[in-house]
Image (spheres, rainbow, N blue to C red):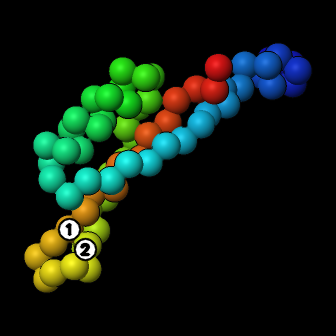
Amino acid sequence: MEKGKAEEQQVRWEYQTTSAQLPEELVTRANALGQQGWEMVSCIVHPNGTSWNSTVTIAYFKRPVT
């Protein structure tokens, strides 16, 4: 494949994050972003710091730049 053609076919991405303390809240946000063409690619659970058993889930999304 020629270099020029490979560059034309390269996909460009944009990224988005969201966070939630409750699983239901994250599902609602993820579904809303999915309706806009975003795909969840990763999520992590992180200590929230407000109490010893409090966490926040951070989700990462991507979609092609149009």
Asked whether, in this view, residue 54 is left or right of residue 8, the answer is: left
Q: Residues within 10 Å of mark 1 (few under 14, many from 20)?
A: some
CB of mark 1 within 8 Å of CB of mark 2? yes
User: Which secondary structure, mark 2?
Assistant: strand
Asked whether, in this view, residue 11 is left or right of residue 28, the answer is: right
Considering only order in the chain, which callout, 2 or 1, is on the residue closer to the N terminus? 2
Q: Is residue 12 above or below residue 4?
A: below
Amino acid type, residue under disc 1 in the picture = Thr
Asked whether, in this view, residue 36 is left or right of residue 56, the answer is: right
Where residue 2 sits, quadrant-wise, is top right
Q: Is residue 47 above or below residue 60?
A: below
Judging by the rendered image, the residue that carries numbered circle 2 is 47
Q: Position of residue 29 (x, y in %)?
A: 29, 38
Q: Which mark is residue 23?
A: none
What residue is at 81 percent from the left and 25 percent from the top? 7
State which quarter of the image contains the N terminus.
top right
Amino acid type, residue under disc 2 in the picture = Pro
Judging by the rendered image, the residue that carries numbered circle 1 is 55
- Foreground residue, 5 or 39? 39
* Residue furthest out toward the bottom: 52
- Foreground residue, 6 or 33? 33
State which quarter of the image contains the C terminus.
top right
Rounded to the nearest angstrom, the CA distance separating label 1 from label 2 is 4 Å
Q: Position of residue 13 (x, y in %)?
A: 61, 34
What residue is at 25 percent from the left and 74 percent from the top? 47
Q: Position of residue 58 (x, y in %)?
A: 34, 55
- Foreground residue, 60 or 33? 33
What residue is at 13 percent from the left and 43 percent from the top? 24
